[in-house]
Image: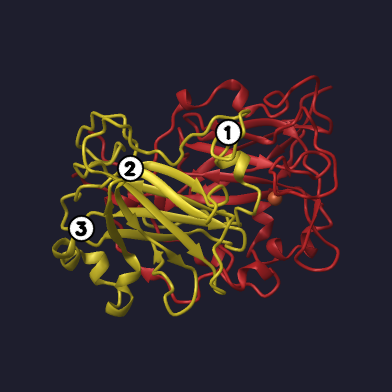
Chain colours: A yellow, B red
Amino acid sequence: MASDEKKLPQTPSQTVGPFFSYGLASEQYGFSELSSIAGREIAEEDEPGEHIKLVGIIYDGQGAPVSDALVEVWQADSQGRFAHPTDGRQKNTPFTGFGRCGTRTDPKNRFTFATVKPGAVGDGEAPHINLIIFMRGLLSHAYTRVYFSDEETANAADPVLQSVPADRRDTLIATREESSAGVVYRFDIHMQGDQETVFFDV
Amino acid sequence: MSDFSEFSERDWPSHPKYIDEGYKSTTFRGPTKPLIPLQQTLSEVTGPVYGQDSVSALDSDLTMNGRKNGEPLGERMIVTGKVLDEFGRPVPNTLVEIWQANSAGRYVDLMDKHDAPLDPNFYGGGRAVTDSDGNYRFKTIRPGAYPWGNHPNAWRPAHIHFSLFGAGIASRLVTQMYFPGDPLIPLDPIAQATPSVDRLVAGFSLDVTEPEYALGYVFDIVLRGPKQTPMED
Ligand SMILES: [Fe+3]
């Protein structure tokens, strides 16, 4: 057991800057010199669970879509299991639950992820996706969470969601849209303003 | 489900504030409302796992991984260091990604319009995984300074961008490494928005320097870590 006493100060955060494309999202931006460790396709076709798309636009404080942001997602699989040794349950699919998307390659500067809807982890939390946002002009990354509009009962019991002031909870709920193309959850992010998305001090 | 230790909190006094008067892009991009405290769950203490099998030897050698018809131009260097958590424990098997400008101060990113030459033999992106003692090591070319539009005659000090995961997404870090003695650091709003910016300045090391080959720099990185050591089985 380590003590709670801190010994070293954390290395300071810096902005990701505008030029991360070839380093962090090379394949999405058309570079072939370096493979990508993660991208927009998180779930393979045969991954069990409901296949969904998570789509959104990041707006700055003037209401303009941010074209040079990087979004990362981290989530459990459809059974609520994380692909990580701290989660003691045995996962048996190649699903990593991690994705990355830059916002410049889409004509509307949307981020899009093809994934499966996560299951509840089993600790009283509602199904959710953790989201990390980086961009030029953001000196420390921002954490938020995506909850699902069709999980009203679970959302009402979720301790994290319930810790958020009631009038701001909506900023964390992705809207389910069904069409012949499949299930899309829409999750726009507002960095500032009346609708400013809730960001967490994780 | 399993037992887990929470990570220690973000050391806010070490990190720049979201809105900084000198760095203009923060004005309409940094969150303005206070962050909501979050009691960490399994979602935050877990994160993507990448091991040695995720990287090739070429990935950490930026003097080699972009070659088309010759050697990249510029000053070769070794950048190495140890990734620790704030309790002093090495962080093994964690991914370290870097990206940087070439020796002329130009990125291969298509949005970089700086009128400085691209180097056909330099890509500028790479990655490594820390060893069991938390050490990483890159070979690369020293990046040049480049101008940016923040204010008249604004130049970024030479820097290498770093991205790290640590043991869970709570320890996620994106940062930049600077070079000792760079006269642009005191003039750079991004560096100056950063408390203890000296902790982002690498040290020159003659021990790391390789004779007849490359100068050596050491850049150690401290991430958030679990408050308690995992239990032994
Ligand atoms: Fe840069």
Can you name the residue that lies furthest to the left here? A153
The picture places residue B178, in percent across and down from the top left corner, at 72, 50
Within the image, what quadrant is residue A148 found in? bottom left
> What residue did someone put label 3 on?
A126
Q: Please, is residue B128 above or below residue B184 in the view?
A: above
Q: Residue at x 40, y 36 (%)?
A: B49
- Check residue B127 in the rendering and tell me which mark sits there, or answer none: 1
Measuring from the top left, give residue B30's x and y in whole percent. Answer: 55, 69
Check contact, mark 1 vs mark 2: CB within 8 A. no
User: Tag 3, which secondary structure?
Assistant: loop
Q: Which is more toward the observer, A107 or A56? A: A107
Label 2: few (<14), some (14–19) or many (≥20) C-alpha neighbours in 10 Å: many
Q: Chain of mark 3?
A: A
Label ID, residue A115: 2
Indicate the secondary structure of the residue bearing disc 2.
Answer: strand
- Tell me: A51 left or right of B179: left
Name the front one of labels 1 and 2: 2
